[in-house]
Image (cartoon, rainbow, N blue to C red):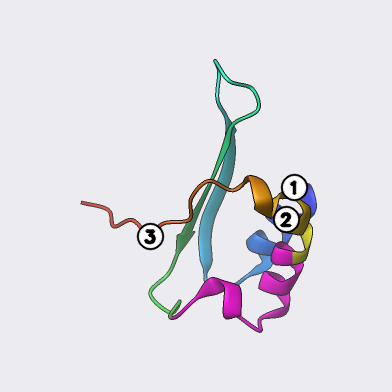
Amino acid sequence: MKTALLGLHRYKNCTYCDLTECDSEKENFILRIEWNANVQGNLLESKAPEIITFLSAIRKHREFILEMRNYSIL
């Protein structure tokens, strides 16, 4: 995950990201990523080198991802 987070930190359109661990279920994590307004389309189809690094780093964990959603700050 360190490699994945480094890729995101280097991506110019990523304004913030963090990884949190559930206190009561240590096997559950949330990766929160904030993008600037320049991000359009599907992140999984991005050709940006930093996103390719991120996706490669999380590839072995993809089967365990329960959801990928977009949220708006209210």
**Which amino acid, mark 3?**
Asn
| Region rendered in magenta | 41-55
Side of 49 where 30 appears, left or right: left
Image quarter of residue 22: top right
Q: CA distance from mark 3 to mark 2?
A: 18 Å
Badge 2 or badge 1: first in the primary sequence: 1
* Element under disc 3: loop
The numbered dot on residue 70 is 3
The residue at the far left in this view is 74
Write down the residue under mark 2: 58
**Which amino acid, mark 2?**
Ile
Image quarter of residue 29: top right
Rate crowding at label 3 as few (under 14), some (14 to 19) or many (20 or more) other CA atoms within 10 Å.
few
Relative image position of residue 73 (x, y in whole percent): 27, 53
The residue at the far bottom in this view is 47
Whether 26 is drawn above or below 4: the answer is above
Badge 3 or badge 1: first in the primary sequence: 1
Whether 29 is drawn above or below 1: the answer is above
Relative image position of residue 8 (x, y in whole percent): 64, 62
Q: Nearer the viewer, residue 40 or 38?
A: 40
Labelled pair 2, 1 in contact (Cβ < 8 Å): yes
Write down the residue under mark 1: 1
Relative image position of residue 25 (x, y in whole percent): 58, 20
* Residue beneath the point at 59% across and 72% down: 44
Rate crowding at label 1 as few (under 14), some (14 to 19) or many (20 or more) other CA atoms within 10 Å.
few
